[in-house]
């Protein structure tokens, strides 16, 4: 009986920027809470036993990973990834889940459908602050959901990693 084991581990690296604006000392920062890793074994094979194909995609559970922001102003968050050891043909996607903000004077717009995370920075989440003359600090907590597609028994057994980078600018 042939057993195929494939472990995919996602490490999340966050880059924080303190920004100074012309009309004050506003700062914007970002940090992450949570992580996701999966281990694929015979339980993830489609029916048919040894030699059967794997399920082709997996999604992270809800309430597992959050981006948290602290800001005095509007901001944008871009997402990209750098491949350390990642199998060809396997794609990684992200979308936002629940978004909680500490004030009614701001809105946060996330990616509600899965978008592929590539090596290029792509706009992922934006905020809009109403009444920008009122510069009290506000916070947000943004749930992140991930999906991996392209899993197959043709991928050799091993550990695979990719680094996801979230860049915030304001």
Image: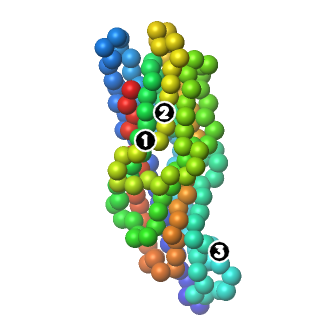
Q: Quadrant of the N terminus?
A: bottom right
List x then y, in percent, for residue 31: 46, 35
Measured in 3D between alpha carbons, the distance from the residue under mark 3 to the one under mark 2, in whole angstroms, is 39 Å
Label 3 sits on a secondary structure element that is: helix
Residue picked out by circle 3: 43
Find out whether the residues at labels 3 and 2 contact each other: C-beta distance under 8 Å: no
Within the image, what quadrant is residue 2 found in? bottom right
Question: Is residue 168 placed above or below 155 in the rendered structure?
Answer: above
Judge the density around disc 2: few (<14), some (14-19), many (≥20) Cα neighbours within 10 Å. some
Question: 122 or 56, which is in the foreground?
Answer: 122
Residue 144 visible in the shown view: no
Find out whether the residues at labels 3 and 1 contact each other: C-beta distance under 8 Å: no
Residue picked out by circle 2: 126
Residue at x 68% of width, y 82% of height: 47
Question: Is residue 110 placed above or below 11 in the rendered structure?
Answer: above
Residue 148 visible in the shown view: yes
Measured in 3D between alpha carbons, the distance from the residue under mark 3 to the one under mark 1, in whole angstroms, is 36 Å
Judge the density around disc 3: few (<14), some (14-19), many (≥20) Cα neighbours within 10 Å. few
List x then y, in percent, for residue 121: 36, 46
Question: Is residue 51 placed above or below 90 in the rendered structure?
Answer: below
List x then y, in percent, for residue 149: 53, 65
Residue at x 50% of width, y 52% of height: 115
First in residue order: circle 3 vs circle 1: 3
First in residue order: circle 3 vs circle 2: 3
Measured in 3D between alpha carbons, the distance from the residue under mark 2 to the one under mark 1, in whole angstroms, is 8 Å
On residue 123, the disc is 1
On residue 75, the disc is none
Residue at x 63% of width, y 53% of height: 61
Question: 22 or 156, which is in the foreground?
Answer: 22
Camera-near label (3 vs 2) is 2
Find out whether the residues at labels 2 and 1 contact each other: C-beta distance under 8 Å: yes
């Amino acid at each position: 009986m042939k057993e195929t084991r494939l472990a995919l581990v996602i490490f999340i690296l966050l880059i924080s920027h303190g920004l100074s604006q012309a009309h004050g000392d506003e700062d914007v920062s970002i940090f992450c809470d949570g992580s996701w890793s999966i281990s694929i074994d015979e339980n993830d094979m489609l029916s048919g036993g040894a030699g059967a194909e794997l399920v082709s995609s997996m999604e992270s559970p809800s309430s597992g990973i959050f981006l948290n922001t602290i800001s005095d102003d509007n901001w944008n968050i871009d997402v990209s990834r750098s491949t350390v050891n990642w199998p060809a043909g396997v794609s990684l996607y992200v979308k936002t889940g629940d978004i909680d903000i500490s004030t009614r004077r701001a809105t946060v717009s996330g990616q509600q459908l899965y978008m592929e995370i590539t090596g290029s920075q792509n706009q992922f989440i934006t905020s809009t602050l109403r009444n920008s003359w009122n510069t009290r600090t506000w916070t947000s907590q943004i749930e992140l959901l991930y999906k991996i597609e392209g899993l197959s028994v043709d991928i050799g057994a091993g550990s695979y990693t990719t680094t996801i980078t979230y860049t915030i600018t304001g």
